[in-house]
């Protein structure tokens, strides 16, 4: 087990969360780190999509490759629409609904 030094206010918040959730502080920290890693992962992906979409050639290349991969998926969903809503698309892909390139 390791010791991590944090500011007194952070420790008080951690202690309060631990008590409120009736879980050890270590679990609260682990969950916070896991959430941070997931958010960072998706933030980097969204930024990458945003940069790619800003470059017409890069986005066209990505879309062409996506069509190829979709055709070999073998999942039988070739004619299906997206399973996500417009809002989810905007959030997940960093897309602007008014500037969607297909």
Image (tube, grey):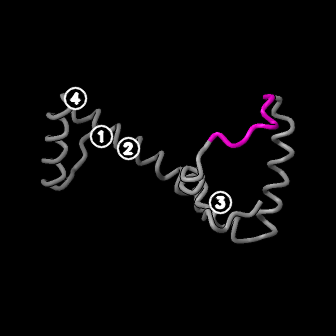
Residue displayed at 27% across by 37% down = 28
Residue at mark 1: 29
Tell me the mark number nearer the camera, choosing from 3 and 2: 3
Residue at mark 3: 49
Q: Which mark is residue 23?
A: 4
- In the image, 100 versus 63, the foreground residue is 100
Tell me the mark number nearer the camera, choosing from 4 and 1: 4
Tell me the mark number nearer the camera, choosing from 1 and 3: 3
Mark 2 or mark 4: whose residue is earlier in sequence: 4
Mark 4 or mark 1: whose residue is earlier in sequence: 4
Which SS class for mark 3?
Answer: helix
**How many numbered circles does the render carry?**
4
| Magenta highlight range | 75-83
- In the image, 36 versus 49, the foreground residue is 49
- Is residue 32 shown above or below 20? below
- What is the C-alpha distance between the residues marked 3 and 2? 24 Å
């Amino acid at each position: 087990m390791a010791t991590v030094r944090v500011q007194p206010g952070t420790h008080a918040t951690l202690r309060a969360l631990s008590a409120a959730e009736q879980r050890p502080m270590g679990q609260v920290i682990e969950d916070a780190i896991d959430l941070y890693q997931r958010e960072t992962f998706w933030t980097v992906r969204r930024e990458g999509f945003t940069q790619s979409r800003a470059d017409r050639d890069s986005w066209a290349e990505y879309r062409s490759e996506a069509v190829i991969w979709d055709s070999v998926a073998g999942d039988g969903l070739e004619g299906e629409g997206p399973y996500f809503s417009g809002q989810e698309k905007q959030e997940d892909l960093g897309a602007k609904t008014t500037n969607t390139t297909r």
